[in-house]
Image (cartoon, rainbow, N blue to C red):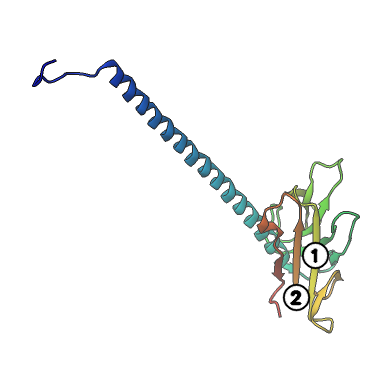
Amino acid sequence: MTRGQSRDGFTLIELIVSLTITGAVLSAGFAAFRTVLDRRDASAAVLEEITRASAERELLRSWIGAARLPQQGEPAFAGLDALDEHAPDDAITLVTSAPTDLDGAETVVQLALDRDPRTRERGLVARLASWPPGRRRTVELDPRVTGLDLRYYSVALGDRGWLPSWVSSSILPSGVEVRLYGDSLPLLLRLPLLIPIGAMR
């Protein structure tokens, strides 16, 4: 090619170099896009876990916060302190006016741990019974829970303070503290949950 003549097209070497550069750019772009998708998936999983944990806490708050004194024949409010050899194993039974998936306005709720290998449910479970006696159902709330610790705030029994147990048909505690334990529980579920019954005084 003489001076002053223009050249049309690419040489083979120029074409190979340009394809190599384009391939590297596309490869880096796909890797960055994959990273964005992975982070989006991880963020969605975290958000789903937070939403689930919030719903679980709100369910416990609504059932316990709407506890009422038992009427004729209904079971007493019973918060029992128990410790097995590995983890706190408390249980609470109450009559609640909060909605459950059983028919009727009133439900007897028992919150406890189920470690029995013969049952389908595991971890934190709610045993629901309609009142007057009728339908019954056991609901698995969280299979990852390995310990349940409950305390009851008293202002009616003299000094204000927290008690490990509460059983009464005539006086409700002013509040309940719920602590859940489990190695795979998210932080939100491991935080103590303070639930006023009526108004915390």
> Which one is earlier in the sequence, the residue at label 1 or at label 2?
1
Q: Which mark is residue 150?
A: 1
Is residue 181 found left or right of 7 in the rendered image?
right
In the rendered image, residue 146, in percent from the top left (x then y), is placed at 80, 52
Distance from label 1 to label 2 (Cα)? 13 Å
Q: Is residue 136 visible?
A: no
- Going 80% across and 74% down the picture, which residue do you hit? 162
- Going 65% across and 54% down the picture, which residue do you hit? 53
- Residue at the limit of the structure toward the left, as seen here: 4
Q: Amino acid at mark 1?
A: Leu
Determine whether the residue tagged by mark 1 lies in a helix, strand or loop: strand
Q: Is residue 175 visible?
A: yes
Q: Which mark is residue 88?
A: none
Q: Amino acid at mark 2?
A: Ser
Image quadrant in which you'd find residue 8: top left
Is residue 99 found left or right of 78 in the rendered image?
left
Determine whether the residue tagged by mark 2 lies in a helix, strand or loop: loop
Image quadrant in which you'd find residue 33: top left
Q: Which residue matches tag 2? A: 174
In the rendered image, residue 5, in percent from the top left (x then y), is placed at 10, 19
- Residue at the limit of the structure toward the bottom, as seen here: 158
